[in-house]
Amino acid sequence: MPKNSRACLLAALLSVVAVCGGDAVARVFPFGPRHRAVNDLANQFVPFHAHLWDLLRGRADGGLLFDWRAGWGTSFLPDYGTYLSSPFAPLVALLPRGDVEYAVYAITVLKTAVAAAAMAFLLRRLGPGAWWWAAVLGASYALCGWSLAEGTYNPMWLDGLIAFPLLCLVGEWVREGRRPLLGPLVMAVCWCANFYTAYMATLGAALVLLVRLAVTDSFRVRTLGRAAVTTGIGVGLAAPLLLPVLLGSRQAHPGLVREFAPVAGTDFLARLLPVTYGFATPAAFVCTAVPLLAGTLLFRRDVPGRERWLWPGLCAAVAASMQWGPTHLLWHAFATPNGSPYRQTFVLSGVLVLTAWTALTRGGPPVDRRAVADGTKSVAAHDAPAGVLPGRRAVAGGSAVVLVLALAALPSPVLTPWALVLAGAGLAAVAGALLLPRRGRYGVLAALLVTGTLLGQAAATTAYADRERLVRLDDYPPLGPEQERRAAALAATDGWPAYRTDPGLPRIAGNDPLLLGGQGAAYYSSHTPAVLTATLDALGGGWTSRGRNLQGLDNPVTDALFGVGARWRDGAVVRTDTRLPLVTVRPPGPPPVYGRSPFRNQELLLGSRVYEAPHAGACRVGTEVFLWAPDATGPARLGEREVRLLGGRPKRQAAMVSLSLQRTPGLRPSLPGPGELGCLDHERLRAAVAALRARAATSVEVTSSGIRAVLPPGGGTAVVAVPQTAGWRCEDAEPAPYGGLLAVPLGSGRTELACSFRPPGLRAGLAAGAAAGLVLLFRVGLRSSAGLGSSPGLRSFRRRGRASAG
């Protein structure tokens, strides 16, 4: 087996062993009783992968452009481009749907392994060196703290971990003037897989390219031009996905806006060590072999001065840029993230690994830099002898650098005793391995020492992060028999599109309709439309994450308005007869204008008064008591009925809740804080629904991205029970909002409605992608023609032709 392949395979194997070993030590799913259902992993990634399973198996309500399940119907292409466009995501369909958590875990481990293999391949491509060292350093990159602490529960980010070495490889092709077709295609795949981290990886690869140009004497303006063209074409090819994602973000409900504040320098340094954790600090750990080797480069006099200083200088510059406000914004596309503010940390880990490899691979025979600069020769590991390992002086200097960094981190509260123990043991092991002879049993011992350091530190960091996440982050119920029973009951009751089936309460995660089935209001995404949040808020809905994580609303009036004919409640599916079809026709007149009271807003959208005000704090007997207390936290009681509220704007808002029917005259509810009471008269609600049914659509047909309905004659306004997000188009009429819902004014003779959805930016993205494809083909064709015209064989043929003619 070629040494390059051996290096890639060993790197992948080491990463799998470390991740799975650490999870097993922590007794975390799938190796123990502790679950992984925390934060966005439970709220977004597992449900979205479950929905992808449904899409791939043809069982979803909707298609690639539109999703009928969550948020009462939302644009799906931006969500796909944000959470599911990785080439690895379709692998979820290989397992049963009930095993979606296993599938997401397997994909996470696979991405880590591929990142390790990609970095190992890049290292062997950059210079000569022992294949097992390339494997260990490649795995060190994939097992960095960012990957183990952040990427493991944000698996979409791991595509950026893979993208960095791939884009650095593209930079090498650009520097050498090679691969004009493959380079832009790799760029496009990386940006499609996850544009967010691919953007960071592109910035990092650009910095690496600049250093490579400087140290190889190949700095040319035309090279920078090739890099810009390659990047532009690659991003252009990804535009059909990128533009809808960008516009979806602009139309989303605004999240938390924070001012960036750098962490203490001691905390930054502490996170370079194993077995540390912190949500708002950079997870910069890499195996101790990496900073040790990077430090030795400063003390290697046999390495040219530019290489000796530029690579460590790049590491320092990237680290410093993470702590300065303007460059922090640059790394994050000019928007401070809502969560962890150091999402670019994997780039720092990558440049540290490249610096470590440079320290290992210099000191061999000189390379013809002029030939490399002209593109006629490349530095390939299999063509060049291995470099000379750092000597005693360099190892001592590198060890001193690591010790100084560790000592400077001692005041940090992030530091743990195990961090110092493992860092010290790893430093001794790797330093000893570097000083051992290279051949025979000593070479094997050196490999075991370095590999053991990597596996021990990475597995311990994984286990520690597993335990800390469950303590510090929000966690949710893992999937199990109860959830499977619930999903089966919802599927058995499903009557879409005749009516919606709401997955109901208690909530499992932020996207229960995607995870459990049915069609509900619950929805959580970076692209939660502002109009959806505003509509649900006006009608008494609840939310967390400052309005982006929308909760289902269990209310008879909203159930009627949105055609909910069945919902999960109290351990079973219950049906209701007070529901409307998806399309109703309202009388001519202005649309409703919402006010502060959700009770009145529901009545405005329904077109009838169905709530009574309480008298002396108590509702009339026979009415259902509803409470709207968005900022209250605690129990609310009416008789024996108790409901717990969790509110407190602007972070979260408690939904309107039912306190049960009023059965005792004058009985007042006990409230945890200020709130408003509404007394629902079910007889009035039935009468209002009956009146609207008389003017409802007689036939409704939904498609993967549209809806058609047959309407009664008479004119008015056709109202579709779906939020009017940007992208809806209707035949022969311009949609007009009606209380936040999609609506179309009708002429007196019009009896049909046909509307379709196209995500904003899709058409422009397709045009940009086509243009980028044409530019790529023209560029490759032009280069091929130029190469053919200057080939030695063609010149010889022409000379022979001229001689024959003479």
Image (spheres, rainbow, N blue to C red):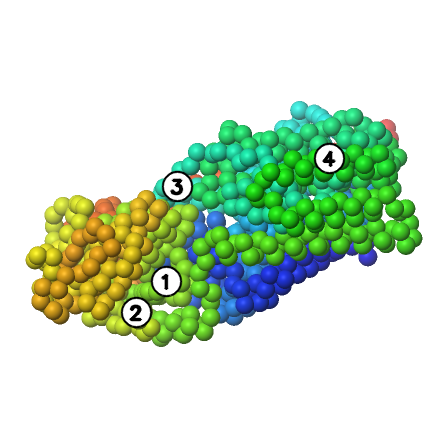
Task: Give the CA distance from mark 3 to mark 4.
Answer: 39 Å
Provide the secondary structure element on which disc 1 rests.
loop
- Identify the secondary structure beneath mark 3: loop
For the residue marked with disc 4, what is the amino acid?
Val
Left or right: residue 588 versus residue 408 is left
| Residue matched to label 4 | 401
> Which amino acid type corresponds to the residue marked 1 in the rendered image?
Arg
Label whose residue precedes the other's in the sequence (1 or 4):
4
Residue ID for mark 3: 256
User: What separation in Å lies between label 1 and label 4 (alpha carbons)?
Assistant: 51 Å
Disc nearer the start of the sequence (3/4): 3
Q: Secondary structure at mark 2?
A: strand
Residue 240 vs 522, above or below: the answer is: above
Residue 557 x, y percent position in the rendering: 19, 61
Dot 1 or dot 3: first in sequence order is 3
- Residue 255 visible? The answer is yes
**Residue at x-position 67% and y-position 39%:** 406
Secondary structure beneath label 4: helix
Q: Residue at x 57, y 67 (%)?
A: 32
**CB of mark 3 within 8 Å of CB of mark 4?**
no
Q: CA distance from mark 1 to mark 2?
A: 11 Å
Say what amino acid the circle numbered 2 marks.
Answer: Arg
Residue 580 image point, x, y percent: 20, 64
Circles 3 and 2 in contact, beta carbons < 8 Å: no
**Residue with the mark numbered 2:** 569
Amino acid at pointer 3: Leu
* Neighbours of disc 2 within 10 Å: few (<14), some (14-19), many (20+): some
Q: Is residue 669 left or right of residue 397?
A: left
